Structures are given as structure tokens and as C-alpha cells.
Image: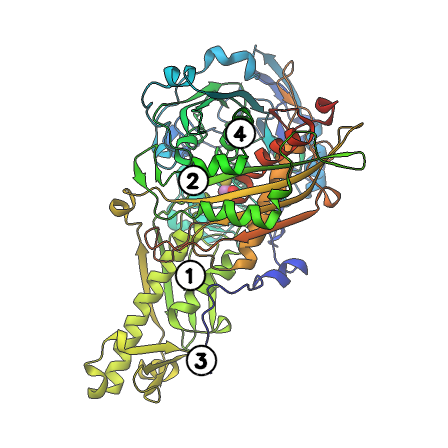
Amino acid sequence: MSVQPSIGKSLNRLEGHLKVTGAAKYAGEYPAENLVYGYIVNSIITKGKIRNIDTGPAMSLNGVIKVFTHKNRPSLAWFDFQYADMDAPPGAAFKPLADAEIKYNGQPIALVIAETFELARYAATLIDVEYEEEDFETNLVDNLDKARTPKVGLATFLKPLPTKPLGEYRKAYEGSYAKASGEFYHGTEHHNPLELFATTTIYGKDGKLTIYDKTQGTVNCQLYVANVFGLKYKNVQVISPYVGGAFGSGLRPQFQLFFSVMAAIELKRAVRVTLDRHQMFTFGHRPPTLQHTHFGADATGKIQALHHAAYAETSQFEDYTEVVVNWSNMLYPSRNTLMEYKLVPLDVFTPLDMRAPGGSTGSHAIESTMDELSYALNMDPVELRLLNYSEIDESTGRPFSSKELRQCYLQGAEKFGWHKRSPQPGSMKRGNKLVGYGMATGVWESMQLPARAEAQLTKEGKLHVLSAVTDIGTGTLTVMTQIAADELGLAMEDVSFSYGDSKMPFAPIQGGSFTVSTVGSAIKAAGSALRNKIFKKAQAIKGTPWKNLKIEDVIFNGGYISLKQDPANAISFTEIIAANKGRMIKTTNLSLPKALKLKKYTRAAHSAAFVEVEVDEELGIINVTRALTTVAAGKIINPKTARSQILGGMIWGISKALREETITDHEMGKYMNQDLAEYHIPVHADLHELDVVFVEERDDIVNELGTKGVGEIGLVAIPPAIANAVFHATGKRINQFPIHFDSLL
Ligand code: MOS
């Protein structure tokens, strides 16, 4: 019986049972000898200075070991660049405890270390801080006069600034037969993964640090810690095997890492620092963004003018940017365009990537405006998109490496039953509920970064692969094992994958939907190199008859190498290992994206979302009764875990459109709903029929695996599809997320 390929199979997560039985350990759960606990104190003012900080009453408690403040902190790295991690936007990264200055509400200002977490938390309440307050600004809409072009930095490479204007947008818009425009807004959103941010730092012999951290990048955190604390890279090991959801929140080292490491070095013992749910609202967030659009079409429905402007919040110290406005002309050809993107620096912490950063923001405005345009043209929304289907990326003039978006529209409309929609808003009813159908397009760039992987044929003749990459709950362990298994023709159970450790071969941060393409390609390359090496060893054993064979003449399957022409002529991996004196055979391989070739193409995953809502006529309550997302994302390695990614994104889309918002009191500059009781996310009762279809898409350009990534694309199209369905149900176009039921009354 030959071993069948694993790629393409719907396999369960390999670590699933460990997670559901509680056996999987998270960063804040690692046992350590002589462990002490830290609790962070956060500023209650928004801007100003600490005039005095009295730690006496806290220190007097039995069991409180130390309180760190800006006054007694150890000496730390001085330069801005030493605090810049792989995902740092242009500017100066926040330096905890640097001085008495307060830059935002919730800023960490002290760390209490005690024998127990509860004691540290209690002692923190006894710390008396005298502040000197200054005026501040936290309201985006009130500060648009401060909007400016973002600074350019390394991050701009992955997040390009707006494309150059084409033609004469204004003239073309004025002369358009049909016009649609709007102002769109969503407020601040905060990350709320199940697992709270935590770091356990173990202080080892000679000051070597073993750090269990909740992060999306073990190497990123290793470099950050070494740079900030002046340590040798080899003396810092960051381990992160299980991550209870991250979605962008762990792309940058968060400040609990800094505090845990600082205290461990100073006290020369193990220190754990865990943030509580309130403190999850004291670092990065999705930035509130205001957008304007003006789309114009001729009488046939062809778009001739596209204007999209976005004003997004950033901090006073870093220019966090997202790709918000580049998408419309990538999706819809137009000869006349104007894309604008400006930042408004406010007295807040630097915003942070949150699943489909920018893409989900831009699609809200673009796809709602397209819907409006379809009504102005008296045309079906799907038809309008098919009519304006772009065969090349008009925003850059480049072809797509592949694009099966048309199939997303067609198969989606068919499966959803879109033809049952009667176009007139308010025309479909079910009892006292107005029924609306809405749809939208999604797009997300398919990126690939350099990564390294090691592949070993172990003494037992099994395959073991290693990479520093994390698994943030996406199924990385399973998918990487599938890729490795196929490279050597092995069954899943004969392959193991070690990951989540900065000591392993380099992997960049896990995010941007680029992990399968990035680390998967490295594993494929390392596996292929290992195959060559094993084959050479086999040739040496088999002697003359195999000497002149090429690797194409043999098959790797089930732990054997055999001749294609004569399958009985075979040699097992265990024989090869025995001939290698029982030693393992290994290769490492650096996988680099083929930058020059890839530059000629636009590489993107696409989707179409179809949504049915019911709106209670009297109460305005909106229910998403059905949602379908069709996705074209190249090769799907594991349909089951990929589907889970899309479903998660769809649920987040429902959340974004109807639930999630951080409410800021701009008098205080403070977020008011800092817990899951008041920060609303969907619960089971909010979720009904959700469906995902992957359309066939072959891409021979994007990378050797043909993968485009499915992390973000599931979120992009759902929020505007919901807004469009609400319009179809009620005739009211609500351009502010989340849509509150009172706005429909
Ligand atoms: Mo990605 S922003 O790390 O979900």
C-alpha cells in the first residue's frame, strides 16, 4: 500500500487533544522554580508627568519583593532603534519606564513583584501616584486638521503607500452618468484573544534567559530582548509553542515581555508577568478610521472614476500604517483615480495590526459604495462587479499571478440563491422581519518572506523538521507536517515538527496570512534538499546499478526509495541510516521569495461574501441568518483548518459590523469598556448558518506550493456585505460600524 499525499486532506489539528484536555501549556502556565509574580500599574491620566510615585505602602506588605518604577529601573538601551522590532512602524518605539512622561492613558508606569499574583495585584492598588496633567487630544474626527502623510520606513515594504493618481478623477466623476459616494467610520477596536498576554522568564546559569512568551514571533522577541537589555542573542531563548489566539496582537513584543525580563534580570530569578483583561486595552488596537469615497460610472455601468481617502489614527511616537485605499482600482479598472491616506497623531498608544488590517477597513467603504452605485445604475450588485471585473491589476498595470474571483461570484451567487433576491429595498419580508441580501468582494495580498527550515532523517528513519515559527491557533503544526510528509512521501505519523522556539531555524513573525507560503516554502525546500542527500547515500549503497540514476528516476514513498520502472528494486530509509553508521541525515535550507519574478505580478487572495439578514421592523435588531464566503486562495493545504480560518474571519466580520467597538471618553482620553462584559463580541446566539467554499485556483507563480494564505481573507468581505444587506432590508444605509439597532429606528 503506497502512502497517499497529505496535502489537500482535511486533517484534524495534531495538537487538538492537548488543547481541549488542558495539557497544552501556555506562556503564563510554565512551572518554574522560585517563581515570583509581577503586576503592572497603569497610568490613569492621558498626558503629562509623574510628579511623585509612592511605593512605600505597597513595599511594606509581607511578600512584596520589589516595585520597579522609572526612578529605580535598571539602565536600559538608549537608542530608539534598539527598541524597534521586526514589525515596528517608522518612529520611536515606546520605551517602558523610560522617564516620568505619560504619553497615553493606560501606559505602564510601575511593576510590583510579589510572592503571588494576587498579592502583587493588591499591592499595585496601594501605589500612590501624583500626576501633573497636560492637555491631550484623542478624538480623530476633531483633529482632522492635523492629518499628514505617513513617514516612510522599513514597514512600508509590506504596506505600500497609496498608488499614484491616474487621469483626471474630478472631471471624470463630475461627468459620470451614475455616482455614489459616502463617508464611512469605524471606531477603535481592541484585541481580545482568549489567552491573555503573559511572559514567564526563567533566569538560568550565567544569566541565560529562557522566556515563555505569548507572541507571534519567537525570533522577533529574542532580538528585542537582546537589544533592549544588552544581552548576547545566544543567551536569550524565546519559546512559544501554544498561543491562545493572537490575530496581530502578538506581532510586536508587548510590554509584559519587557517587564518580565527586566525583573528576572534584576532579581536573578524566575518572574511571570500576566496582563489581565482590562490591561488588554492598554496596548495596540485597530485604529479608528474615517473614509470618503466617490465612485462614478458611465451609462453601461463601467467605472470611470474612483476616489478613496482615509484618515487614520496613530500615536505621537510611531506612524502605524495600513493599506486601506489601494484596493478599489485593483478590483475595478478605472482610468481616473485618486487615492489618499493620511495619519492623525493623537495621544494614544500606537495602533496595531488586527486581522485583515487595512483590508477590512478599506473594503467597508469600497464595497458599500459599489453597492450604492449598483442602485444608482439600477443594476444587480453581482452583475456590476462582473461588468467591472479586472483582468489585470489596473492600479499598477501588473497581471495577477492567478485570479479566480469570477468563480467566487458565480459559485457564491448560485449556492446562496442570490437570484431569489428582489432588488427593491424593503421588498422581502418574513413575518415581522425585513429580509435583506447583501454581497461584497474581498481581497488580501499574498505575501512571502524569507525563512529557514531544517529537515532531518532521524536515526529511526523518520522525518523531523524544525522552524522557529509559532502556531497562533491557525493549524500551522498540522499544515507544516503535511507539507513535510509529502516532500518525502511519508505518512503523517512518520513526520514530526518542532516549532515555536527562537533557537530553531529562522522564521519571521507569523501574520499577514504569509506563514504557509513563507515557512511552508522553507520546509518544502529543506525536505527537497534532504531527499537529494538521502538519494545520494542510497546510490552509494546500491552501487553501480543506481549510480547513473537521477532523482527523477526514483519514488520516495512510505520510507522507501524505489525505481519508477521497477518498484521491487527499493531501499528503505532505515537501511540508509544504518549505512550512515546510525547517524541522522540533515539539511537546512533558506527559502527566499523570488523577488524579481514576483515583482512582475500582483499576488492576492480573493473572496466574495453573500449575507442574509433579518431586521426586526419594530426593534431594529439585526440578525445575520445566513452567510457564505467563496474563497480563491490558491492551493488549500488542509481544507478543514483553512475553513476554520475563514469561519473565524466571518464571525469577526459579524462582530465588526454589528458588535465590536471600544468607546473612548475623549474628556478623559480613556477607553471606557475595558472588559468582555461591555466590549461586545458575538456569542453563539448571534451565529447561524455559516458556509465556506474554496474555488479551484492554480497558481504556479506565487510560490512552489501555490498557496496564498487564508488568515485574513475571511474577514474582509463580510462587514460590507452585512451593511449592504441591512440597506437591502431597510432602505437605510448606515456607514458607521458597528451598526447600532437604534440607527435603524
Ligand atoms: Mo494577522 S494581522 O497577524 O491576523
Given contact means CB atoms under 8 Å apart, are the residues at marks 1 and 4 in contact?
no
318 or 223, nearer to the observer: 318
Mark closer to the chain start, 2 or 3: 3
Which of label 2 and label 4 is nearer to you?
4
Q: Residue at x 59, y 27 (%)?
A: 188
Give the residue at mark 3.
2
Question: Relative to 352, does residue 129 appear above or below in the rendering?
Answer: above
First of labels 3, 1 by sequence position:
3
* Crowd around label 1: few <14 · some 14–19 · many ≥20 (10 Å): many
Q: Is residue 12 above or below residue 500?
A: below
Q: Which of marks 2 and 4 is nearer the N terminus?
A: 2
Please tell me which of labels 2 and 1 falls first in the chain.
Answer: 2
The mark tally for this picture is 4
Q: Name the residue under label 1.
A: 466
- Real-space Cα distance between discs 2 and 1? 22 Å
Q: Nearer the viewer, mark 2 or mark 3?
A: 3
Residue 224 circle label: 2
Which residue has dot 4 on it? 374
Query: Does dot 4 land on a helix, a strand or a loop?
Result: helix
Name the kind of residue labelled 4 in the image: Ser
Which residue is depicted at the point 49% across and 23% down? 312
Can you give x and y, in whole percent of width and height, for residue 338 in the image?
A: 38, 22
Q: Is residue 76 above or below residue 5?
A: above
Q: Which amino acid does label 3 sit on?
A: Ser
Distance of mark 3 from mark 4, alpha carbons?
Answer: 54 Å
